[in-house]
Image (spheres, rainbow, N blue to C red):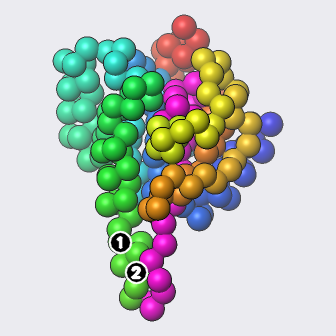
């Protein structure tokens, strides 16, 4: 079923303007999907480090600096409290502004930004979506596998969000990352 989930996700990504890649800040490198960059191609991508309340401010600054030095757009969030979510919305809308510029050049009306929330199981995707919606729109639990299908959710006037189930790679080359995920 992993291959089917990946295939469906790749099909839906064609309709997306920006990718919100969620990772657990405690294990930011272990929760990187090795195939994600090839799936999204040239689409804008925002790296969302969730659960920042569970790491020190010093560790967060180091992570942000490391990713920024590699050209990554990083937003730190806490899905439980909502910390960082307004900044995430602003960043997603600004990254996707060029979509509506291209539409205007073709004589089309502007539309909402379409964002996909992607990440490993249990990194807080549903919690972040609930914060984006300002209500409980997605079932969220402390166990993996709660979200089982892809679905579009309207998050305000300017944002549509694709809620995707967590997708693990079929195999993990990095055995240290695999151990971190297992703990």
Cα distance between the residues tagged 1 and 2: 6 Å
- Residue pointed to by mark 2: 102
Residue furthest to the front in view is: 135
Q: In this view, does 57 lie above or below 159?
A: above
Do tag 1 and tag 2 residues touch (Cβ < 8 Å)? yes
Q: Where is residue 111 in the image (x, y as percent from the top left)?
A: 48, 72
Q: Is mark 2 on a helix, strand or loop?
A: helix
**Quadrant (top left/top right/bottom left/bottom right) for the C terminus:** top right
**Quadrant (top left/top right/bottom left/bottom right) for the N terminus:** top right
| Magenta-drawn segment | 106-128
- Horizontal placement of 97 versus 167: left or right? left
Q: Where is residue 49 in the image (x, y as percent from the top left)?
A: 38, 31
Residue 182 is tagged as none
- Residue pointed to by mark 1: 98
User: Residue at 25% across / 32% down in the picture?
Assistant: 64
**Callout 1: 10 Å neighbours few (<14), some, many (20+)?**
few
Q: Where is residue 71 in the image (x, y as percent from the top left)?
A: 26, 47
Viewer-closest of 65 and 127: 127
Please tell me whether residue 109 belongs to the stretch shown in magenta: yes
- Horizontal placement of 29 versus 165: left or right? left
Residue furthest to the top in view is: 183
The picture quadrant where one finds residue 110 is bottom left
Viewer-closest of 82 and 23: 82
Q: Position of residue 77 (x, y in %)?
A: 36, 32
């Amino acid at each position: 079923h992993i291959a089917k989930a990946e295939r469906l996700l790749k099909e839906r990504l064609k309709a997306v303007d920006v990718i919100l890649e969620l990772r657990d800040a405690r294990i930011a490198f272990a929760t990187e999907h090795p195939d994600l960059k090839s799936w999204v191609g040239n689409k804008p991508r925002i790296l969302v480090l969730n659960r920042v309340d569970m790491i020190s401010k010093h560790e967060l600054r180091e992570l942000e600096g490391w990713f920024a030095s590699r050209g990554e757009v990083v937003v730190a969030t806490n899905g439980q409290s909502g910390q960082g979510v307004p900044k995430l919305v602003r960043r997603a809308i600004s990254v996707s502004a060029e979509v509506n510029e291209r539409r205007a050049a073709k004589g089309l009306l502007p539309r909402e930004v379409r964002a996909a929330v992607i990440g490993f199981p249990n990194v807080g995707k549903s919690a972040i979506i609930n914060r984006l919606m300002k209500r409980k729109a997605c079932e969220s639990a402390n166990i993996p596998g709660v979200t089982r299908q892809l679905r579009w959710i309207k998050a305000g006037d300017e944002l549509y969000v694709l809620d995707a189930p967590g997708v693990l790679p079929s195999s993990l080359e990095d055995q240290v990352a695999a151990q971190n995920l297992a703990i």
